Amino acid sequence: MPNTLQEMIKRKLDQNGWSYNDVARRGGISRSTVHHLATSVRLAQLPQQTTLEGLAKGLGIPVAPVQRAAAEAAGVHLYFENAPETTDPEVEILIASVHKLTPKDRRHVAVLVESLLQEDGQA
């Protein structure tokens, strides 16, 4: 069964039609490193911070979800100040990404989210 880091990498590759080499080039890390992180169910140790930053950059996502997923894959528990105990990496990516949007685009996203919640009967 794939771990969260593997799922995260696979999802971004599939969404964007990228290869391991594309992610490596974008993040300034080796292709073999991306391949290792994408295919290892259990990491022997937590990758170096620069590796995690490069992977995050290569995938185009914030580093925090990558850190959490890599820690989980290595069997390490990371504790972040002021962070909920369990956080969905997709939620973290969404939250971090919203800050990059223009105010107009944020309003569009808010309207979309509200309509999806109403559709599901959650609003």
Image (spheres, rainbow, N blue to C red):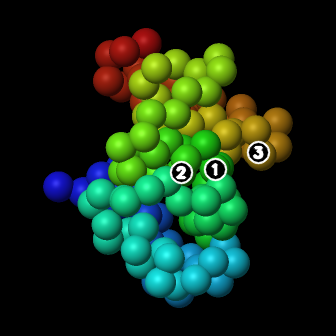
- Residue 122 in view (yes/no): yes
- Residue lying at 56% horizontally and 37% vertically, measured from the top left: 92
Badge 3 amino acid: Leu
Quarter of the image for residue 41 reads bottom left
Q: Secondary structure at mark 1?
A: helix
Badge 2 amino acid: Val
Q: Nearer the viewer, residue 88 or 50?
A: 50
- Residue 26 in view (yes/no): no
Going from the N terminus, do you reach mark 1 or mark 3 first? 1
The residue at which mark 1 appears reads as: 63
Q: Secondary structure at mark 3?
A: loop
Q: Would you say 33 lies left or right of 4 here?
A: right
Q: Are marks 1 and 3 in contact (CB under 8 Å)?
A: no
Residue 14 image offset from top left, x and y in percent? 39, 71
Compute the Cα span from label 1 to label 3. 18 Å
42 w.r.t. 79: above or below = below
Q: Nearer the viewer, residue 10 or 63?
A: 63
Residue 38 image offset from top left, x and y in percent? 38, 69
Q: Would you say 15 lies left or right of 23 here?
A: left
Residue 9 image offset from top left, x and y in percent? 43, 64
92 w.r.t. 61: above or below = above
The residue at which mark 2 appears reads as: 66
Q: Secondary structure at mark 2?
A: helix
Q: Are marks 1 and 2 in contact (CB under 8 Å)?
A: yes
Q: Would you say 92 lies left or right of 87 here?
A: right
